[in-house]
Image (tube, coloured by chain):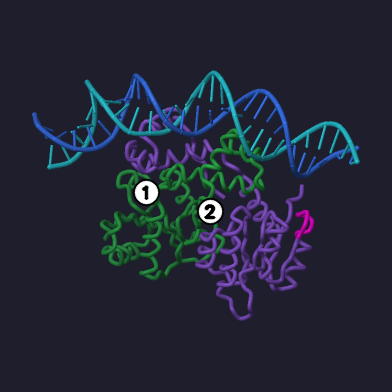
Chain colours: A green, B purple, C blue, D cyan
DNA sequence: GTGCTTTGTCCAGATATTAGACACGTTTGT
DNA sequence: ACAAACGTGTCTAATATCTGGACAAAGCAC
């Protein structure tokens, strides 16, 4: 089973070629861009399943600012397409910032092929999940209620619903297990 | 303005003392544990606003497995309390895994005091936010609809609601801006 | 073009939400 | 200790929302 379209954005042609060879068997299509300039247009046109984005363009600038900017821009425009970042400079602060800015994952060069495939697959799978409205609601209600120490009046207030409605919701689904957040 | 209760868990007494001094002025209370053994009990009793958890216990074991286990355990039991991880071994993989396992943030030793305070404050603020039910619903609807390329029938199906209901929801809130995910 | 899907629109019955009210138990402040 | 303030569980009646079902018209596939 192949995993749709992968878009790779990296300014190193050797990397693009390498990725194309390594992942060509795993994805139906592997598109490449050597510069993020046309990224938005390309994404809009091709609707990739996942994006592999390098963090370091403009030679000599390796703070990752460039990649971070593009991450934000792409993620803002296409919040549903998972973006996996890749960088040669293993920097914890950068990785944390990237994940908090919406990156699906963060890997370092040189990469392990199987790991990269797993990461991209995970990103696609996670992005493809759709949570039913009712479940989303139940979970959120439970969380807020929990944060209010079970105070239904306050919870209802924070949730923007009436106390009775919250009351009904709670007794309607007395035990909805919370989704895990594990990897 | 002080930021509630901080619980620090670290097996190095010197660190505990240092943190107590550095952050005593910022938090109303700073509790410390030199081992995570009693973490769950302490948290249940003290309801800290945020937890600062070291990743490396049992001397010689520095893979972070220990801390990761405790992160999962604590986060599973108290999903509403933000957990900031701290480690001496800057490891990108570990940081990524931690964030995906529910950590609010990830900092490395030696830490910068102001940065640590900012991180803890951010974690508390973010955890304290409560999103009204209607907004949560709107955003989710918009995302799913987007993922379905605007196909309302399919989106409604995935969301577990009827097509007409989705139709009504969409025309009820034609332009709900998505919340940002920035740091 | 012919079929299949989707859309926009309507209906009427079922369900959910709402503000308000009430008695009762629990905190809180003094 | 006492009163005031607050939260709960319960009820009602008006309003709103959700639902399956139906229909013609528009869009897409082959």
Numbered label tally: 2
x, y (%) of residue A65?
A: 51, 54
x, y (%) of residue B169?
A: 43, 31
Q: Nearer the viewer, residue A173 or B36?
A: A173
Q: Which residues are magenta?
A: B23-30
To which quarter of the image does residue A50 belong?
A: bottom left
Looking at the rendered structure, the secondary structure element under dot 1 is: helix
Mark 2 and mark 1 lie on one chain; the one further toward the N terminus is 1
The image shows residue A160, relative to residue B183, as above or below, that is above
Residue drawn at (63%, 53%) of the image: B123
* Residue B27 forms part of the magenta stretch: yes
The answer for which chain carries disc 1 is A
x, y (%) of residue A33?
A: 34, 54
Q: Residues within 10 Å of mark 2 (few under 14, many from 20)?
A: some
Q: Nearer the viewer, residue B108 or A39?
A: B108
Q: Residues within 10 Å of mark 1 (few under 14, many from 20)?
A: many
Q: Is residue B52 left or right of residue B149?
A: right
Residue drawn at (28%, 66%) of the image: A21
x, y (%) of residue A165?
A: 56, 35
Residue drawn at (56%, 44%) of the image: A141
The answer for which chain carries disc 2 is A
The residue that disc 1 covers is A39
The residue that disc 2 covers is A100
The image shows residue B116, relative to residue B182, as above or below, that is below
Q: Nearer the viewer, residue B18 or B83?
A: B83
């Amino acid at each position: 089973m192949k995993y749709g379209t992968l878009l790779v954005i990296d300014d190193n042609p050797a990397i693009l070629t390498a990725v194309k060879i390594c992942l060509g068997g795993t994805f139906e299509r592997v598109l490449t861009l050597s510069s993020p300039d046309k990224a938005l247009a390309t994404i809009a046109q091709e609707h990739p399943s996942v994006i592999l984005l390098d963090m370091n363009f403009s030679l000599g600038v390796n703070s990752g600012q460039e990649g971070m900017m593009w991450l934000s821009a792409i993620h803002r425009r296409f919040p549903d397409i998972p973006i996996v970042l890749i960088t040669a400079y293993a920097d914890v602060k950068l990785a944390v910032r990237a994940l908090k800015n919406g990156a699906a994952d963060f890997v370092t060069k040189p990469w392990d092929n199987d790991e990269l495939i797993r990461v991209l697959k995970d990103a696609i799978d996670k992005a493809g999940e759709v949570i039913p409205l009712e479940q989303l609601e139940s979970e959120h209600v439970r969380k807020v209620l929990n944060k209010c120490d079970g105070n239904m009046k306050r919870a209802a207030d924070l949730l923007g619903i009436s106390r009775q409605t919250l009351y009904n919701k709670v007794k309607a689904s007395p035990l909805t297990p919370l989704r895990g957040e594990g990897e």
